[in-house]
Image (cartoon, rainbow, N blue to C red):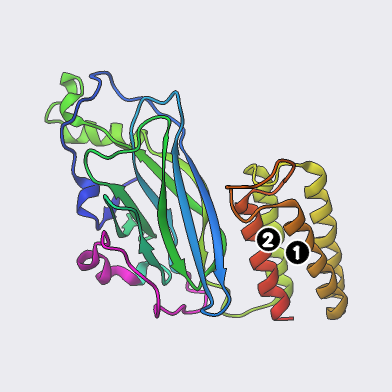
Amino acid sequence: MKRQICIVSLLVFVSVAYSAEIPKYEEYFVQTVVNFDSISGIYKYNYTLINPVGNKNELWSLDIYIPKDPKGIELSWENLTYGEGYSRTSSETIKDKIIAVGIDGPSGWTYGIGYDEEGKGFVGSATLSGIEILPGSSVKGLILTSYGLPAIRDTMLQPYVDTDSLPDEYYENEELSKQLQDSLIYHTKTIGPTAPPLDFNPLSFLDYIISMKHEAFSLGWITNKGIEMSLDQKLDAARKKLSAGDTKTAKNILNALINEVEAQGCETYEGCPKGKHLTPEAYALLKYNVLYLIERL
């Protein structure tokens, strides 16, 4: 996919010790934890990138698609923070491509705003040369801040490719090298902010939550079929009550659903006891979106 990336380091390849064999497509993982500050109204999205043992390629970049939705409310840019690695000059000119978001990251990372050939905006982050994520390693500290609610977002992770160490047919062939680079991009899903709908309809928003719950199960964020069915029963019951105009009972059912989410899930990966069946991704999706709905009933 052709992309306009406004982070200079994302486009630079430098020579380091690397195998002369052609890099192979590999899987990578993103873990996402969401915290909410009820005083500021800001959600903090914390990302951990994982390059599993057994991979050969070094992981070096993460792109999260958070395009601006014309049907969403206009989110504020106030009080959102930016780390020292933020590519301000290039990013500030295309803020209209994404929803309002602050960006921060660990030392040695650079990050900013980009967009693809369709004009879809994303946040891009990459390591500086020489500190790529080695197989068997991970990195924490990539953070987005936003007034936007947690949603399931398209995500791309990309390994480092040392073009100087590729076989001869890639020498000075930028098109072939670019094809190889694009073929190695790992496409997955994670949690990122989105703008709530401008024209809020409780029943439509509940249907949206139900659809995210289904996708969360398919992504492995809900790990027990019985728990998924229990959540389904509560969501379906709340929908019937809302359809009948019984808002009070619907709120009671949705509060019971939040209690189940808190009992069956963990807010973070660290210290989460065995036997929990909702990952922090499913926990954030269901808890914060259901709370948003309850507050508007």
Residue 198: where, in percent of width, then height? Answer: 56, 79
Quarter-wise, where is residue 294 in the image? bottom right
Q: Classify 10 Å Cα crowding around label 2: few (below 14), some (14-19), many (20 and above).
A: many
Identify the residue at the far left of this view: 172
| Kind of residue indicated by mark 2 | Leu
Q: Position of residue 281 (x, y in %)?
A: 60, 53
Name the secondary structure under disc 2: helix
Q: Would you identify the image quadrant in which residue 13 lies?
A: top left
Specify few, some or many for label 1: CA neighbours under 10 Å numbering under 14, 14-19, or 20 or more: some
Q: In what quadrant of the picture does the N terminus appear?
A: top left
Residue 109 spot, x, y in % from top left = 29, 51
Q: Amino acid at mark 1?
A: Ile
Q: Residue furthest front?
A: 271
Q: Which residue does the numbered mark 2 point to in the structure image?
A: 286
Give the mark nearest the N terminus, 2 or 1: 1
Q: Is residue 65 magenta?
A: no
Asked whether the residues under the numbered discs 2 and 1 touch, taking CB atoms below 8 Å apart as contact, a structural biologist would say: yes
- Residue 19 rendering spot, x and y as whole percentages: 25, 20
Please say if 16 is above or below 221. Answer: above
| Pick the front one: 279 or 189 | 279
Between 85 and 166, the one nearer to me in the picture = 85
Q: In this rendering, would 224 be left or right of 233?
A: left
Residue range of the region highlighted in magenta in the rendering: 69-95
Name the image quarter holding the C terminus.
bottom right
Looking at the picture, does residue 82 appear above or below residue 75? above
Tell me the mark number nearer the camera, choosing from 2 and 1: 1
Q: Which residue is mark 1?
A: 258
Which residue corresponds to the image point at 80% horizontal and 48% vertical from the top-left?
A: 227
